[in-house]
Image: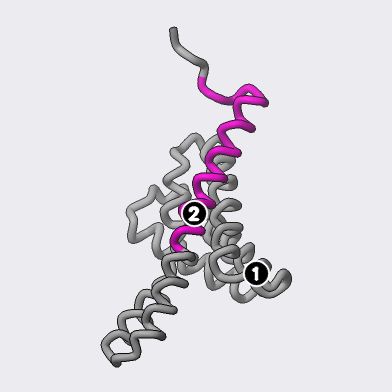
């Protein structure tokens, strides 16, 4: 698991460079992606969760970590979310859906396509849950924005 943590850090570091993130945030971006990937791995291996539930768990953790880092480093949370989501994107599922469709195996293409859509939905839902949790937590501890008017 430590090797996958390090490899995902390197991959997200490269994605942060490609995304033109400021250099001072490369390490934080890499940490976000690595933590998200480890949460995904733990969910799938230790808890036998399906890919969609694991993606939901990992993206929730990513959103919360991104919110914390945005406060600590005084940067927008999307600075850490975008590169950090990279390990969770179901690129292989999209590829295999198209591959099976081209091969004429429509049942397998549909199965992979549905699984891919569920993973993408899990990622989106996890980001929303994590952002909502972070917003509520920040308001409770007094770091949220004050209402105007």
Tell me: residue 71, above or below residue 59: above
Mark on residue 34? none
Q: Residues within 10 Å of mark 1 (few under 14, many from 20)?
A: some
At a point 37% along the width and 59% down the height, the residue shown is 17
Residue sitting at the far right: 46
Residue at 34%, 90% (x, y): give it.
105
**Residue on which the image places disc 2:** 29
Question: Which residue appears at 41% of the width and 53% of the height?
Answer: 82
Cα gap from disc 2 to disc 1, whole angstroms: 26 Å
Quarter where residue 5 is shown: bottom right
**Mark 2 falls on what kind of element?**
helix
From the viewer's perspective, tell me whether residue 15 is left or right of residue 8. left
Indicate yes or no whether the magenta region holds residue 55: no
Q: Which residue is mark 1?
A: 49
The stretch in magenta equals 120-145
Among the two numbered marks 2 and 1 on one chain, the one whose residue lies closer to the N terminus: 2
Check the image and report above or below for 44 versus 67. Answer: below
Residue 133 among those drawn in magenta: yes
Name the element at disc 1.
loop
Viewed as shown, does residue 23 lie left or right of 18?
right
- Chief secondary structure of the magenta portion: helix
């Amino acid at each position: 698991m430590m090797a996958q943590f390090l490899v995902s850090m390197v991959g997200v570091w490269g994605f942060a460079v490609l995304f033109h993130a400021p250099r001072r945030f490369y390490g934080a971006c890499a940490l976000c992606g690595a933590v998200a990937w480890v949460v995904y791995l733990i969910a799938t291996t230790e808890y036998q969760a399906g890919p969609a539930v694991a993606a939901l768990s990992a993206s929730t953790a990513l959103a919360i970590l991104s919110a914390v880092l945005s406060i600590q480093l005084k940067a927008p949370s999307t600075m850490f979310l975008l590169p950090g989501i990279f390990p969770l994107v179901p690129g292989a599922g999209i590829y295999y859906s198209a591959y099976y469709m081209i091969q004429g195996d429509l049942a397998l293409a549909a199965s992979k396509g549905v699984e891919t859509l569920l993973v993408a939905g899990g990622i989106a839902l996890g980001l929303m849950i994590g952002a909502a949790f972070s917003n509520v937590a920040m308001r409770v501890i007094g770091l949220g924005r004050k209402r105007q008017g």
